């Protein structure tokens, strides 16, 4: 059978090519009475390290003659033997430092963050600094007697610093500053010991030394302001871009994309509420046990919004936890997660009533156990979800760290190293059996709701008479109660021709069905068995002549029924009137003005 024989000679009277066009026909009306998030195809700088050999300090790094050659194979915060011992010369007065010159990689007037991990040896103090010109520097000095309260200074702008305690007496020092005007031959980054003397205008400390030591590991200089060491380097700088989750305004359609930038059409979702407050920072009523948390990394939305959830060093479970009210029924927990430090697994658990949990291996991007799923969103980030049902109205969600070989929640009681853990952001709990797009409940806030979406056009606008016709769809997803991909209807639901998934608890594997009915109650239902994995479905209808197929398969027919031509007013996409939203992507919808042949239907859906 030739191409011309298989495909209809007729052209559709209406066609929405949402995956390729990326816009709506001006005759269509889209509504959503709230903002909503989507992967719109844009990207952001997700991680960066301008420094080379970030944990190998006897290569690209240089040293002053008053500093002995660094001694490697020291125990680092992550337990590896990649840290270095820095030892000043036996005696003298000079500036014993280690430095690197990332020339050409640092722009003028840019806010940067320099991260270095430091541990006390015999020196009483240590410092890190950035020098952008001969006498323009920013520095942070830590006193090992009170190491989490660094002193800062320098002539560059926007200078601030933090020092966070890790395991085994290590501290992660992060210095943020504006580079100012970077002169030729500069910049330099420094790390060195001190007797308490502050760096001078050049970012270096001159003091009288006598063989004092400090340990150093994990250097990072970035424009992302990330404070977590997430970008180790060897002989090349690190820059990685990732897809951006962005917010769209009220009544603006969401054209969604995969992580590799491919368009998957317009996203149509039902109303949903995020029942977890403080989703932007895990603050407020969120409880943390045997761990620490602080906002340190770039999240999937491209902002410095992800928390570093670091394990404590005791042998008890490590968790973040929150109660919420849901009234019972289906529940889905979801969160975006990424490995931090040594490989750790994430457990999502309902911790109050059911004890149900799902375990996720973020190193391989797989679900280890439990009822849930995992989806990659770029640069090591995954969206993980747990699905369950409970009659209890006030469950609690817990996010737990477990070792890399743990297969269940019971592995959560283990001795942590104080450094490793998870990066987490955008937690969500919903009263439904699937996770919808992220709904931000902010900082200091309660619940938040995303409104239902509607996309339609008047049949008079597109010149459709309503006598007979053919509907064609190309879709992904379809979750919830009889999610409807497309419907021709009369505005009240009495007369309609529609294609939907055939279950009150449908998912993307549920079979399709087609329905045609008129106001008198005469109807015809065409069940498409084995169609759950199909993306393309077609329905043709005329009085006493109905046919449907999916994926180019067998055509299901009916020769009894009345075409609902008399009162049709609206072509609805991704819903049936104001309900049964598709909860997935609509790539293409076409409406033909006549009932096409069975051969045409098979060709269009192959």
Image (spheres, rainbow, N blue to C red):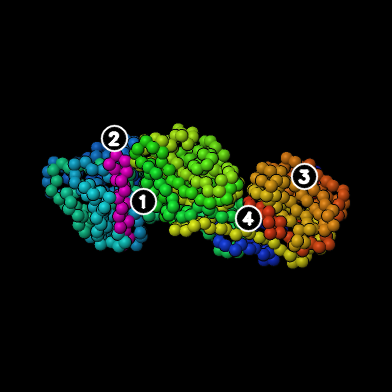
For label 4, the residue is 270
What mark, if any, has residue 600 been given in the picture? none
Q: For this view, does 171 lie left or right of residue 460?
A: left
Is residue 441 shown above or below 340?
A: below
Q: Earlier in the sequence, mark 2 or mark 1?
A: 2
Mark 2 and mark 1: span between their CA atoms?
24 Å
For label 2, the residue is 73
> Which corner quadrant of the image does residue 12 belong to?
bottom right
Which label sits in the foreground, 4 or 1?
4
Residue 436 visible to an observer of this rendering: yes
How crowded pointer 3 is (Cα within 10 Å; few <14, some 14-19, many 20+) is rated as: some
Mark 3 and mark 2: span between their CA atoms?
67 Å
Name the image quarter holding the N terminus: top right
Q: Earlier in the sequence, mark 1 or mark 3?
A: 1
Q: Position of residue 345 (x, y in %)?
A: 46, 39
Q: Position of residue 545 (x, y in %)?
A: 86, 51
For label 3, the residue is 527
Q: For this view, does 401 lie left or right of residue 76?
A: right
């Amino acid at each position: 059978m030739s191409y011309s024989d298989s495909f209809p000679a007729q052209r559709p009277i209406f066609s929405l090519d949402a995956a390729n066009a990326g816009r709506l026909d001006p005759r269509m009306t889209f509504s959503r009475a709230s903002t909503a998030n989507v992967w719109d195809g844009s990207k952001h700088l997700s991680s960066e390290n301008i420094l080379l050999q970030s944990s190998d300090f006897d290569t690209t790094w240089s040293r002053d003659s008053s500093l002995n050659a660094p001694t490697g194979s020291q125990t680092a915060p992550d337990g590896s033997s990649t840290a270095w011992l820095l030892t000043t010369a036996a005696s003298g007065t000079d500036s014993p430092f280690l430095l690197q010159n990332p020339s050409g990689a640092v722009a003028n007037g840019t806010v940067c963050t320099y991260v270095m991990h430091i541990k006390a040896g015999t020196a009483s103090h240590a410092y890190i600094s950035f020098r952008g010109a001969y006498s323009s520097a920013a520095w942070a000095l830590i006193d090992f007697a009170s190491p989490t309260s660094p002193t800062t200074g320098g002539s560059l702008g926007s200078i601030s610093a933090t020092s966070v305690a890790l395991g085994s007496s290590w501290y992660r020092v992060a210095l943020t500053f504006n580079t100012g005007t970077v002169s030729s031959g500069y910049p330099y980054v420094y790390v060195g010991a001190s007797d308490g003397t502050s760096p001078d205008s050049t970012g270096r400390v001159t003091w009288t030394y006598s063989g004092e030591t400090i340990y150093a590991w994990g250097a990072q200089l970035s424009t992302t302001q990330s404070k977590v060491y997430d970008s180790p380097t060897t002989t090349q700088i690190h820059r990685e871009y990732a897809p951006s989750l962005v917010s769209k305004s009220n009544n603006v359609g969401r054209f969604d994309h995969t992580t590799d930038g491919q368009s998957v059409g317009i996203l149509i979702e039902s109303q949903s509420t995020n029942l977890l407050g403080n989703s932007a920072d895990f603050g407020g009523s969120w409880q943390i046990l045997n761990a620490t948390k602080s906002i340190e990394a770039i999240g999937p939305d491209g902002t410095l919004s992800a928390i570093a959830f670091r394990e404590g060093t005791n042998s008890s479970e490590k968790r973040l936890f929150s109660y919420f009210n849901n009234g019972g029924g289906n529940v889905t927990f979801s969160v975006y997660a990424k490995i931090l430090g040594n490989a750790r697994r994430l457990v999502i658990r309902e911790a109050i009533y059911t004890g149900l949990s799902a375990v996720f291996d973020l190193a391989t991007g797989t679900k280890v156990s439990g009822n849930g799923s995992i989806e990659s969103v770029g640069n090591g980030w995954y969206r993980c979800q747990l699905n369950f049902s409970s009659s209890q109205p006030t469950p609690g969600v817990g996010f737990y760290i477990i070792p890399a070989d743990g297969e269940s929640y019971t592995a959560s009681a283990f001795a942590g190293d104080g450094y490793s853990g998870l990066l987490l952001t955008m937690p969500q709990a919903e009263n439904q059996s699937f996770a919808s797009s992220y709904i931000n409940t902010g900082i200091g806030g309660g619940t938040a709701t995303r409104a239902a979406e509607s996309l339609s056009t008047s049949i008079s606008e597109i010149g459709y008479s309503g006598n007979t016709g053919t509907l064609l769809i190309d879709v992904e997803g379809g979750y919830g109660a009889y999610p409807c991909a497309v419907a021709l209807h009369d505005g009240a639901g009495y007369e309609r021709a529609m294609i939907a998934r055939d279950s009150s608890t449908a998912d993307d594997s549920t079979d399709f069905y087609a329905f045609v009915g008129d106001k008198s109650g005469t109807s015809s239902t065409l069940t498409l068995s084995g169609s759950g994995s199909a993306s393309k479905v077609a329905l043709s209808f005329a009085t006493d002549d109905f046919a449907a197929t999916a994926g180019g398969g067998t055509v299901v027919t009916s020769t009894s029924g009345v075409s609902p031509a008399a009162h049709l007013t609206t072509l609805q996409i991704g819903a049936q009137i104001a309900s049964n939203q598709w909860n997935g992507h609509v790539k293409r919808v076409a409406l033909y003005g006549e009932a096409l042949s069975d051969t045409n239907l098979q060709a269009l859906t192959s």
